[in-house]
Amino acid sequence: MSPASPVWLRVRVVRVLWALLAVLPWPWKLWALIHNFQECTWQVALNKFQRVGENLESDRFLHQEPVDTVRNVFNMLVDSPIDRRERYLGFPYYLKINYSCHGQDSEDLVRRGHLMGLKPLVLVTFQAPANFYRWKIEQLQIQMEAAPFRSKEPCLATEVCVMSWYTPMPIKNGSVVMRVDVSSNGVGPIIPNQRFHVNINGFLKMEGDKVQFTVGDELFDLKLRYFVNVPSRPLWYNVDQSPVLILGGIPNEKALIMTSTNFKEFSLVELSIDSCWVGSFYCPQAEFSATIHDAISTESTLFIRQNQLVYYFTGTYTTLYEGSHSKWVRVLASECIKRLCPVYFSSNGSDHIIALTTGKHEGYVHFGTITDGLVSFELLPRNQSMCQRILATNEMNILYMVPQFIPDARGLEFLMILGTETYTNTPMVPKGLFFNVYNNLLFIWGNFLLQSYNTENFLYLADFPKESTIKYLVNSFQGDVAIVTETEEIWYLLEGTYQLSRLFPSKGWDIHVSLQVMKQSSLYASNETMVTLFYEEDKLYQLVYLIQKQQGHLVKRQVPVENVLLYQQYDKYHVEPEGNFRTLIFTNFCPFEVMRLGNLPNPQAYTRQERYLARPPMVLNPSGFHTENSLAVYQGLVYYLLWLHSKYDKPYADPVHDPTWRWWKNKKQDKDYYSYLASNWLSAGGVHIDMDSYEKVYDLKAYYRLPERIFLDKGAEYHFSIFLTARGHSFEMGSVFKVRSRVSVGVVVADPSCTESLVKQRVLVKRNSVLFLVTLRDKSLCYDQGISGHHLMKTSLMVKVVGSSGFCFQNTHLGPRLQGNLMVPVFIGCPPGKRLAFDITYTLKYMRLKNKHYYDCIYQDPEMPCFLFRDMFYPFFLIQDLVTGDSGSFKGSYVLKVVGGGRSLDSIVDYNEEEIYRYNSPLDKTDSSIWTTKTAGTTHDMAFYIMSYENSGIEWLCLENSPCYDMTPRGIFPPEFYFKVLVSNRDVDNSTYCDYQLIFLLHIHGLPLSAKRALFLVIVSASVLVGLVILYIIICLLWPYVVRACSHLRWRINNIIASESYYTYATSSRVFSLSSQPSFEAITKVPSQVDTKVENQEDQPNLEPAEEKQPET
């Protein structure tokens, strides 16, 4: 049987089910289906490239480099839209995806889902790195469709016994933290979306075929004494940046709990540290132990404190930097460290940590900075300690003095500390501070809880009992705070409210546990110990040690905050008579019945989330199962898609603003041909690559909830609406006959001097509802210009329905959800994903129009066209939004500078500040200017020209002291020069927070020679020409004489040759006659010598020239 064809539904089945629930009065069967919605869960495992199809455990994520394993497969794809000359690589891992439902066999479920057309959709989100100086800050996602694959194990069935879905597990340079969201394509069984953390573990190494930890040795025995009766401890790490989480506190063991999957999987590791404990008079130690007291993880480095000693270990992360440490390094060896404190967010491209000292440096702190794995500490304050400054109060600004005793609230939920209130006899014992950088909320805690938004006015929250003492706080940074006391109580607080709720122990908790025991849940037991409490996004989780059937194990479970708060309201009820019966009515304190968000803009413009789409190639197989070769093709295509993304950030803008345009630009016209091959099962390699399956997504829609974060540029706004249906009759007549609702909404901005909110109310009387239109606006006051994604200001927006805190819940298929309180982090500055690019297409078009011609170089480069020196140069630039796909001309002002240059690409050098000033400033008096313009505008100090879209004409000068002066040609072609040009709008453009900086190379040909060299060449050329002319005239005048002389010379030479020939002949004849005389004596008589001479003279021709004959006398 063939599976259903892949369908990508825009409207999920879940929405259809809810619509049916709204129409049908009592759809019990459908409600039962949705009620069991959460019984099925996705299962995700990591498999090596070579182990695909094997039913083994999940591999550990330690390999970080692309692998050359797909080249041979791509060489077989002869008739396909790819270019086989390109280099396609693969990733070292696959994601193996299954799902399971409670009480059912997973293998049967997966087969059934495949035959019904189920296709898991995998969304991988890459977390941006901390060091934005080294890596580009971007919010990148890639969505993939999983491909079905049969197991390699022997199977007796004809088609399939065991199968799974697979997708490549992509890796991106600069990112070690990745979130994997798995969802359904809307066909087949209903499975809720689920998120997994798949991070790179840089603290692993390969020893032969085994994976080992570099920080120590893995322990496989979780002993009871490690966790039972051991107090919980905080989990400290850099939020959204730490790929590996560590947790200490194992009694008398130098061991850590380590995980790279947020405790979905974890290991107990014994550390390879020296454990040398030395006390001194300035560092007294009451007792020594092997326990790791403090443990903090950053993006690349682990920190621990054992007694007074501090160690760190830098992981191997080749995607972030080069090099690492292979052992633990001890720091602050001469200091007595009593506590390590985390810094939850990175700043200025680095992670940070704080070490508190005691002993000789009491009152000082060591501020640690971690950049690309390099650790350094600075002692602060620099001049004198905090203790000395407190004594010298005139040199210190005291923000607030904590009261000596706990105030008497007299039944109030909170109390403003003004100094006039009455106090109890219980002293205030401060234990710690916590500051939220998003909403500026400061907590001071101990056996009390104080909060303040401005560090001046503090509120005392009276719901927290003074008999308890807070051990640590946990903040979600999305509006939620969890509190753990010394007695392991758990309290909950919504930021911006004053009502504390105890979650454990409580009646609501007991009800929840009882229900879980009835369901036979494996996450709860009668004997359990909480190890730690932490937030994962906006969900609160526990790491708990359970003892079940004499066996102990660690589990991660979600704390049901909403369920517990909801159950605690069940004791608030009353009985009303209704006819002959009495009805039990529970009191609902929520002021509204329905709360909906609407008019939400498309999220990408504000979240700055870039997303790519990649579907697997189509296999020419009736069963629809993929092979190892087709999965390898999928790997290579995903790799190349991300490679195109990384290479798209180049100075010269493409004609089409899309990274995938270059991939298919020469193959689009053959799309029908490739489809014909696939439809007739003729595609090479048994796979068909659909070019439309690999694209960048620009039109994501909002899903009726506020985004995870909002980025605001200068003067930008964010709009949305809140629709509230009131409970009962909630309207009254106000002044001037206006209807007023008792349901009200409060909007709080964390920095009112930087942002403002506008709220408009519309009362809908007939619908018993109120519509609030909310606008968040940047005031353009609190931020200077910055590079895209750099040094953003953190703030937040909080929306609260009055009276809803802890009382309003929305029933969903995943359980109740708190309503009435919204919190969104806001980042003010230049948003990520915006860039300035050189618009080469329009520049060439405009120059042809203005200069009436265009001359390129002899050897043309389509990536870098040439420009003629004598032509006016008119550069134009684009502002490209890599997130939304928008691209338009840059209409602001900018400064253009030549910051480097050379005769060839290999000889380009960067100029120093002095040279940049001389080559580009209109104030230069040294004849060093490279260019000039007719634009009159300059910077405030008149050092540089200010260019704009309307005034962009540049005339090249290359004066005497400039580097491009007097360029001699190499060969027969005119001289060329490469200029390294910097374009920046900093301090000259007030329309944006973005400091657009573009550096690109400009190829100029036809440079002129210097005046001296040109004059010298003219003189030499003229001299040679005149000399040739004179020589020609002389030759013309003397030519007849030369001809006669040559003729005479030739005649004389001929005469000489003839004379020598005659005498040679005469001599030879005489010798011949003498030798033959005896034989002729009898026949004749030889004449006498005189007669012979006379005869010879008469017979000899006249050989003398006529002109030399003597005249006759």
Image (tube, rainbow, N blue to C red):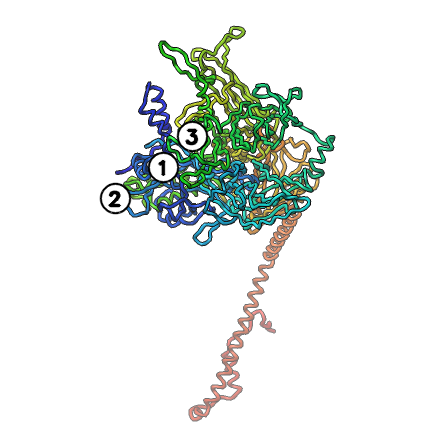
Q: Quadrant of the N terminus?
A: top left
Callout 2: 10 Å neighbours few (<14), some, many (20+)? Answer: few
Q: Mark 1 or mark 3, which is nearer the start of the sequence?
A: 1
* Residue 580 is at least partly visible in this image: yes
Query: What x and y, as percent, mark residue 349?
Result: 58, 39
Q: Nearer the viewer, mark 1 or mark 2?
A: 1
Determine the residue positioned at 56% across, 70% down: 1052
**Quick one: label 3, few (<14), some, or many (20+) residues within 10 Å?**
some
* Residue that lies at the very extreme toward the top in this rendered image: 737
The residue tagged 2 is: 158
At label 3, which amino acid type do we have? Answer: Val
**Spatial distance from mark 3 to mark 2, Cα to Cα?**
47 Å
Whichever of labels 3 and 2 marks the residue nearer the N terminus, that label is 2
Q: Amino acid at mark 1?
A: Tyr
Q: Nearer the viewer, residue 91 or 661?
A: 91
> What residue appears at the point 39 percent right and 14 percent down from the top-left corner?
583
Q: Is residue 947 visible?
A: no
Closest to the observer: 27 or 426?
A: 426
Q: Are marks 3 and 1 in contact (CB under 8 Å)?
A: no
In what element is the residue under mark 1?
strand
Who comes first in sequence, dot 1 or dot 2?
A: 1
- Please give left or right for residue 701 compared with residue 256 in the image: left
Where does the image place residue 267, in percent across and percent down from the top left?
Answer: 47, 44
Which quadrant holds the C terminus?
bottom right
Which type of secondary structure does the marked residue at label 2 adopt? loop
Label at residue 155: none
Q: Which residue is mark 1?
A: 99
- What distance separates the C-alpha of mark 1 from that of mark 2? 23 Å
Q: What amino acid is at disc 2?
A: Thr
Picture coordinates of residue 887 (x, y %)? 50, 32
According to the picture, the residue beneath numbered tag 3 turns out to be 513
